[in-house]
Amino acid sequence: MKKQKANVYTHKKENELITKLNDLLANYQIYYQNLRGMHWNIKGPKFFELHAKFEEFYNDALLKIDEIAERILTLGYQPLHTFTDFVKQSEIREEKNISDAHKSIKLIIDNLSILLKKERDLLSLSDKLNDEGTNSLMSDYIKEQEKTLWMLHAFIS
């Protein structure tokens, strides 16, 4: 982990927080790219509905990517920023040529479930560190994604 300037944290737990934030950043980048691919390639009777929904999702992911990277910078560290690092670090895997509605939604559910687990881990750690900035960010993401997952499950039921 490359240290940028005088950072806010100096202990092992704080370094763990930065590592987990970079991990979340990498996973969001791959999730974002998966969404772009599905947006471009979706076919079938749900095309118009899903094409627009995937655009909404990838725009949201792009905002979160920026927020996470800026949080890392705020804490005095450097965020990951190469696709090589993102692919290497991410638990979410690159997918390609997904044009089926059901497969697309299932992939988004799987990707969001991974992100949600990572956000909950970060929330727990940031709470122990009294890091209200990261805590607030994760709380907002968790609330939003729990609702999105509920809606996606309802859509494919």
Image (tube, rainbow, N blue to C red):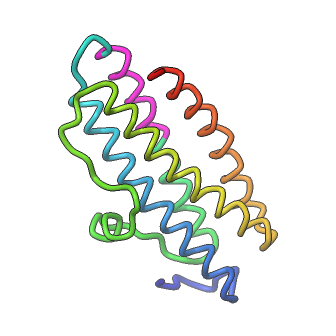
Nearer to me, 60 or 30: 30
> Relative to residue 125, is residue 108 depicted above or below?
above
Nearer to me, 5 or 31: 31
Please tell me in which quadrant of the rendered image residue 129 appears: bottom right
Q: Residue at x 55, y 61 (%)?
A: 70
Q: Residue at x 27, y 69 (%)?
A: 84
Please tell me in which quadrant of the rendered image residue 51 appears: top left
Nearer to me, 82 or 96: 96
Outermost residue toward the front in this view: 157
Q: Residue at x 68, y 45 (%)?
A: 140
Q: Would residue 52 be counted in the magenta stretch?
A: yes
Q: From which residue to which does the magenta span run?
A: 47-60
Q: Is residue 105 left or right of residue 94?
A: right
Q: Position of residue 53 (x, y in %)?
A: 42, 24
Q: Position of residue 128 (x, y in %)?
A: 79, 71
Nearer to me, 154 or 37: 154
Q: Position of residue 156 (x, y in %)?
A: 44, 23
Outermost residue toward the top in this view: 45
Please say whether residue 13 is visible from this viewpoint: yes
Outermost residue toward the bottom in this view: 11
Label tally: 0
> Relative to residue 96, is residue 38 depicted above or below?
above
Please say whether residue 62 is visible from this viewpoint: no
Q: Position of residue 103 (x, y in %)?
A: 31, 32
Q: Is residue 111 left or right of residue 64?
A: left
Predominant secondary structure, magenta span:
helix
Q: Would residue 88 be counted in the magenta stretch?
A: no
Q: Residue at x 40, y 61 (%)?
A: 91
